[in-house]
Image (cartoon, rainbow, N blue to C red):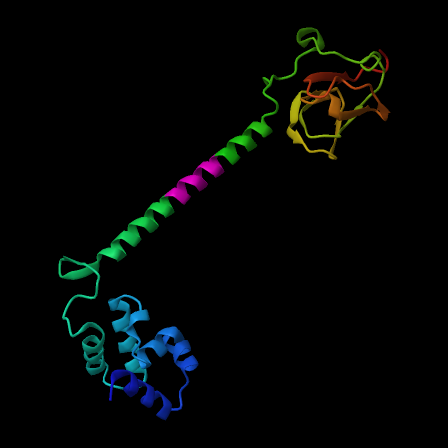
């Protein structure tokens, strides 16, 4: 009785299907049938084929060593050669060269992916920092109108009021710096659709990096646009003493 017939008879007597053996041993049914039919030409390389026979025989409770030797004799003429994988001996360990090459390839791929991700996140952080700092302008602490040359709409600074309420609403993303009563209270990108309300008892100073994309209201009255889209403009609203 040949190897294939021995395995097949043992399987049938145990009432086990090829599908069940495929699921339990993870050996493809194609190879199981090839072993039972002794169609060895379609089997994978020797090292895998020998492992399949050993696993199949062990699953059926047969003498795996005896059947492996019988398989080698039938499939390879009994040649006592290593299973087609060159072995590298290091400190008593046999390491397949193919495994080493696969490990090196995996390491190179992992390093490449790691470098790509590091570069991607670095660029993302730089872009985010650039957005937070506004459209490339120099940030200066507000000074008096005479020193900074800040432009004001006529009548805004001369109204005799006791508080300044300024609303800045962005129609498009716009960098905004706001100083209320001499203290910086906001400096970031104001996203489109967002509104910032500022109230000061002495003054409210704002600088915008996209003047044509913001609507500014001062004490309930909308003022004229400070400039065009992409222009950097600033203005200061000064509270005047009612007694003037």
**Residue furthest top as drawn:** 146
- Numbered circles on residues, count: 0
Splitting the image into 4 quarters, where does residue 214 fall?
top right
Splitting the image into 4 quarters, where does residue 192 fall?
top right
Residue 142, horizontal then vertical, whole percent: 65, 16
Q: Is residue 216 above or below residue 146?
A: below
Q: Is residue 58 above or below residue 13?
A: above
At 60% across and 18% down in the image, what residue appears? Answer: 137
Residue 147, horizontal then vertical, whole percent: 67, 7
**Residue 171 makes an appearance in the image:** yes
At 40% across and 81% down in the image, what residue appears? Answer: 18
Q: Is residue 33 left or right of residue 167?
A: left
Residue 224, horizontal then vertical, whole percent: 82, 18
Magenta includes 156?
no
Magenta includes 118?
yes
At 25% across and 68% down in the image, what residue appears? Answer: 46
Q: Which of 77/214 is in front?
A: 77
Q: Which residues are magenta?
A: 112-122
Q: What secondary structure prevails in the magenta region?
A: helix
**Residue 165 makes an appearance in the image:** no
Q: Is residue 118 left or right of residue 75?
A: right
Q: Quadrant of the N terminus?
A: bottom left
At 76% across and 23% down in the image, what residue appears? Answer: 201
Splitting the image into 4 quarters, where does residue 159 fall?
top right
Residue 176, horizontal then vertical, whole percent: 67, 25
Q: Is residue 218 left or right of residue 180?
A: right
Q: Which of 38/167 is in front?
A: 38
């Amino acid at each position: 009785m040949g190897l294939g017939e021995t395995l097949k008879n043992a399987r049938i007597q145990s009432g086990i299907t090829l599908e069940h053996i495929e699921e339990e041993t993870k050996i493809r049914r194609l190879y199981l049938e090839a072993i039972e039919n002794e169609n060895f030409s379609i089997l994978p390389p020797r090292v895998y084929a020998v492992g399949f026979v050993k696993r199949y025989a062990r699953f059926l409770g047969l003498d795996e060593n005896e059947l492996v030797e019988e398989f080698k004799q039938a499939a390879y003429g009994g040649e006592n050669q290593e299973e087609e994988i060159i072995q590298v001996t290091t400190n008593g360990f046999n390491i397949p060269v193919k495994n080493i090459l696969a490990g090196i390839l995996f390491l190179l791929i992992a390093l490449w992916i790691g470098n790509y991700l590091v570069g991607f996140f670095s660029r993302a952080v730089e872009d985010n920092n650039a957005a937070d700092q506004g459209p490339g302008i120099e940030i200066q602490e507000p000074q008096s109108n005479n020193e900074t040359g800040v432009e004001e709409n006529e009548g805004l600074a001369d109204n005799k009021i006791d508080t300044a309420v300024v609303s800045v609403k962005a129609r498009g993303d716009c960098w905004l710096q706001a100083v209320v009563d001499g203290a910086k209270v906001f400096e970031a990108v104001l996203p489109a659709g967002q509104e910032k309300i500022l109230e000061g008892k002495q003054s409210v100073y704002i600088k915008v990096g996209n003047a044509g994309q913001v609507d500014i209201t001062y004490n309930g009255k909308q003022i004229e646009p400070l400039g065009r889209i992409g222009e950097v403009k600033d203005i200061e609203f000064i509270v005047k003493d009612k007694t003037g």
